[in-house]
Image (tube, rainbow, N blue to C red):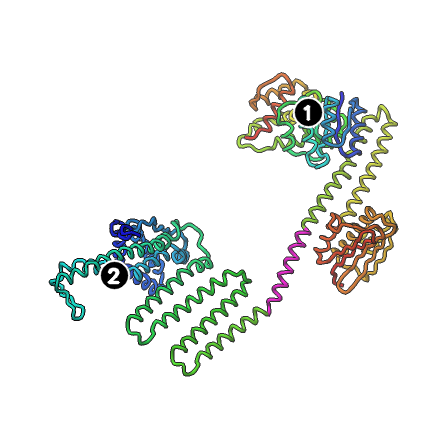
Amino acid sequence: MRVVIAEDLALLRDGLTRLLRDNGVEVAAAVADGNALVNAVLREEPDLAIVDIRLPPTFRDEGLRAALEARRLRPKTRILILSQYVEQTYADELLADGSGGTGYLLKDRVMDVDQFVDAVRRVADGGTALDPEVVAQLLTRRRTIDPLEHLTQREHEVLALMAEGRSNASIAETLVVTVGAVEKHVANILAKLNLAPSDEHHRRVLAVLAYLRSKD
Amino acid sequence: MNAHTILRPLGEARTYRQLLFLLSAAPLAALWFGLLFAGWLAAGLLAVTPLLVLVLVGFRKLTWLAATAEARLARSLLGVEVQAPRAGLGTQGYWGRIRGVLADTSWWGQQTYLLLRMLVGGPLAIAAGSAVGASLWRIVTPITYHWSDESFGSWRVDTLPRALLFLPAGLVGLVVSAWLIRVCAAGWRRPARVLLGAGHATDGAEPLPSLDSVLRRSLPYHAAFFAVLNGLLITIWALTTRAYFWPQWTLLSLGLVLAFHAWAVFLDRRAFDPRIRALAVHVGSSAAVSLFLVAVWAVTTRAYFWPVWPILALALVAGIHATVVLATRGDRAALARRIDALTASRAGAVTASEAELRRIERDLHDGAQARLVALGMSLGMAEQKLESDPDAARHLLAEARAGAHEALKELRDLARGIHPPVLADRGLGAALTALAARSPLPVEVSVDVPERPAAAVEAAAYFVAAEALANATKHAQASRMRLRVTKSAGSLNVEVADDGRGGADAGGPGLRGIRQRVEVLDGTLHVTSPRGGPTIVKAVLPCAW
């Protein structure tokens, strides 16, 4: 798997490169600003672009803008955004087009190396990886009629892990249940939220995310 | 100019309509007189009762009805397009309603028009009627001379030829009257349009006009009223007794009121400080009253100059007022300047603190937070390699520890950038010595301060020195620097000099930041930095020793 990294702090850029290489992910290019990122994505055609949201010159959401631009120019580009803060609005912008291959994680997650690499592979495969903090904000959104209150405790937990983008196996491992139990919970959740059942896992995750992100 | 043009007005219907308009003033004059007189009498009598508002509202309504009738006349007979605007009553409160009615320009315009119709239109109607009547009488003299029995001295009109002599006179009279009617009627057009159409229809829900604007707008009407009324009275005097000039009383008293009004409006034009304005009103009114008293003396006994006493008293009071106001003027100006300075420095302080906070956030983000992420990555990787490659794991753990040291150092530097601990613990001397020691260039430090000043002053002095040293190190290409802190009466002075190439920009971000810090404490910052020459940065911070 080949990735492109965009991070302006040399310390983190080098650290990330080393971490990925150690875990069997090839780093095709490591750049330090938005323009270089777009060029690298177009030139190298990586499986995934890992982008820090704060890049020069504005140090605001330059990275997000550049990543979305790269995706516009090369539609199947997968993006994983890293940030020291998670903002709901940025997550919304990333997920707006409803296609998969998107991730938004706190830089903290990098320290859990196995989980991070797992997320990287997942997004590169076309799935999603949302930080649990973002998911928590999505789930606590108030609605006038909240169908989420019809979910059982267990279903809530499964829903949260689904929204993060995890696979059924990963969810089963985290909750210490069987994969079959997870499948059943997922089916119940989809039914209660009135979402169409689907065989493709990624599609189900996207449906759940779209549902959670929709306003009343 | 041919006969046709001259005779034209006689033939047009318009002339006769206009004649009717002029004649209508005669009966209407009596009506309007009754209305205005009764209205103002009632308002005056009931002024101190709660009925005032009812009287005023009713009076205004009746005036409006009269004005509408006049407008109808003007429209049909004069051909003037005018409508009397209707005014609503939505204003709130007793006094609000009264003010609303009194400030209603349309009402005043309408009253003025009715007054004009009464005072000018009445006589004009009589004149027009007489002119036309006389001319017509002359024309029919050949028919009526038998029983009219006219004579001019000894020459009697008793034969047809003599009667026929008057015929041309009558015809000429008619033609002239026709022209005069046209002229007079044209003269009524403008007043009708302006006065009857004054103001605009409201529903009373508009905000009340301010007293100043009411005074301003009503001044022309007041002056016109004064002129018309006194003109009328003088005309009456001229046509009657002519013995004793009694209109002088109305002239003087109404003149005094008009003088007050005009003075108030005059002052309004100039944007004065309110206290000066009050003084001007006082002095102006005292002067007006004094002149009034002198005029009264001038038209009465003239024996002994009795106004001197009231004038002296007024002058004394006005003088006291003036002294008080002018004496405290200096204080107020100084106060105003101080307020301006404080507002500016407060804004500066707010900007400076915001910039500081942003800087701290950036430093934390790029410094300590990044270090911790890197540290975490090293630990994560070490965890991974613990079994498979222990040497690599050990290496990674050592890296992690070094990273922790770096993070602590960055946090320490950040804290020092906010407030250095040694400054709080040991004071300026120790803090500045430490600052100089950290500098890459040699710095000669001399701190001569007997006791520690206030913490805010200390901090400001420290940061001035820090910024000046940093600037010199970065830009000045100096070889040595001197840092001196001294005390003088009521202030602490910080001076940083370097022997570099000069040309420092006093408006640059760093110097601007310390300038704001210094000015917030009411201090001053001087930067002398000629090109090529040495740079000296001096801050004077007020300080109570």
Q: Is residue B238 above or below residue B168?
A: below
Residue A198 visible in rendering: yes
Element under label 2?
helix
Q: Which residues are magenta?
A: B327-349
Give the residue at x 73% y 50%.
Answer: B507
Residue A145 is situated, as x and y percent measured from the top left of the image, at: 53, 30
Residue B103 is situated, as x and y percent measured from the top left of the image, at: 41, 57
Give the residue at x 33% y 73%.
Answer: B246
Is B30 situated left or right of B220 in this image?
Answer: left
Q: Are marks 2 and 1 on the same chain?
A: no
Q: Is residue B10 above or below residue B306?
A: above
Q: Locate residue A156: give its quadrant.
A: top right
Question: What is the chain identity of the residue bearing mark 2?
Answer: B
Residue B98 is situated, as x and y percent measured from the top left of the image, at: 39, 58
Is A164 situated left or right of B216 in this image?
Answer: right
- Residue B96: mark in rendering: none
Residue B51 is situated, as x and y percent measured from the top left of the image, at: 34, 60
Placement of the C terminus of chain A among the 4 image quadrants: top right
Element under label 1?
helix
* Residue identifier under label 1: A175
The one of B21 and B389 positioned closer to us in this rendering = B21
Q: Amino acid at mark 1?
A: Leu
Discs 2/1, front: 2
The one of A163 and B456 positioned closer to us in this rendering = B456
The one of B457 and B221 positioned closer to us in this rendering = B221
Residue B34 visible in rendering: no
Mark 2 residue crowding within 10 angstroms, few (<14) / some (14–19) / many (20+): some
CA distance for labels 2 and 1: 112 Å
Mark 1 residue crowding within 10 angstroms, few (<14) / some (14–19) / many (20+): few
* Residue identifier under label 2: B126
Q: Are marks 2 and 1 in contact (CB under 8 Å)?
A: no
